[in-house]
Amino acid sequence: MRCKRCDGPAVIEVRRHNAAFCKDCFVVVARNQVARAIEAFDMFGPEDRILVAVSGGKDSLALWDILLEAGYRADGLYLGLGIGEDSDRSHDLCEAFAAGRGARLVSVDLQRSYGFDIPLAGREGPRSSCAVCGLSKRYVFNAVAHERGYDVVATGHNLDDEAATLLGNTLRWDVEYIGRQSPTLPAGSGLVRKVKPLYRLSELETAAYAFLRGIEYVVEECPLVAGNTQLRHKEAMNAIEARSPGTKARFFLGYLDRGMPIFRTAQDAVQLVACANCAQPTTTAFCAFCRARAQILGERLAPPAEDRQIVAEMADEVLPAEIYAGDAR
């Protein structure tokens, strides 16, 4: 097997491109794919302050590495979820990565800052552990970026993540969510811009990049992830991809080119207001995070006379994609 770019010995085969690459050429190809994604959606520029949400997994650390090597002003943000040794090891790997590159890592602990962790949320909360975890991440990412003056939050969602999310929304014909799915979510009304520069790279490709770059990352899945619907959609897409390489890319990139403009025209504008408890943007009196936190901790957000009105608002709430978009390591 020979490298498509330099004709040297190849170390990785990318079936969807019908190509193989040596170590150095694959690193270049991966970085070029990210640069192409950044340019296509005007995600950020050299002067922007970027906050990369890192979990200790391959995708987020690979993204941070690519942005640092490209010369961007990229800091990392790690959110401690309180999932025992898994969280401890994840944090250690993020700290080691930052120290090895002279980069800055901002660390936030969910328990210390907000009074609960994800295992407690799974036992006491109104939603599954995964749902509360994703909600907490997006809330904290936006809050920290907004408070510290970052221009953009970058997450490690890859092609597999985006294709699986699109598949799930399409199976439900959830037109609003389909129309909001995008590699870039604009800033506004208290929301920091959110971007997904890895959307052109598959999970296998980000794993290969991390391995070839010598990045140590958490290999094991989160111990609380069993039964996650997103994983079932990924498995379905993997089965199709195995028989027809390139399906994921055709599906998601085709949506971006031809489907997204159509679905977006059908959307109604979402009016955001400040949460009465934390001032972050929401469509109702209290944001989804504050409501979930209150239920987990057994707290009350409003006087009893207002509870019925709040329940009615919760039932009618339209959730911004910035709050409930899919999440990934």
Image: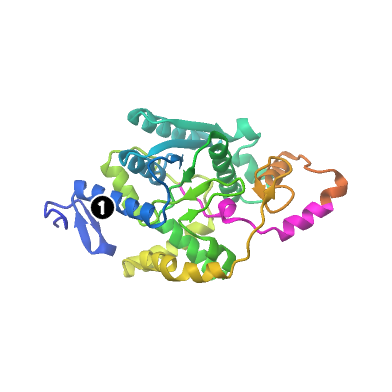
* Residue at the extreme right of the image, as rendered: 305
Q: Residue at x 33, y 39 (%)?
A: 71
Count of marks, rendered view: 1
Amino acid type, residue under disc 1 in the picture: Val
Q: Nearer the viewer, residue 126 or 195?
A: 195
Q: Secondary structure at mark 1?
A: helix
Q: Percent position (x, y) of residue 95?
A: 42, 30
Q: Quadrant of residue 147?
A: top right
Q: Percent position (x, y) of residue 196?
A: 44, 51
Judging from the image, the colouring scheme is rainbow
| For residue 174, side relative to residue 259 (left or right) | right
Q: Percent position (x, y) of residue 16?
A: 29, 64
Is residue 126 in view from this perspective? no
Q: Residue at x 62, y 51 (%)?
A: 128
| For residue 88, side relative to residue 24 (left or right) | right
Q: Is residue 291 above or below residue 103?
A: below
Quarter of the image for the N terminus: give it.
bottom left
| For residue 173, side relative to residue 92 (left or right) | right
Q: Percent position (x, y) of residue 56?
A: 42, 39
| For residue 154, side relative to residue 292 (left or right) | left
The residue stretch that appears in magenta = 308-329
Question: Does the stretch in magenta take in 55?
Answer: no
Q: Label 1: which residue?
A: 29
Q: Residue at x 50, y 49 (%)?
A: 194
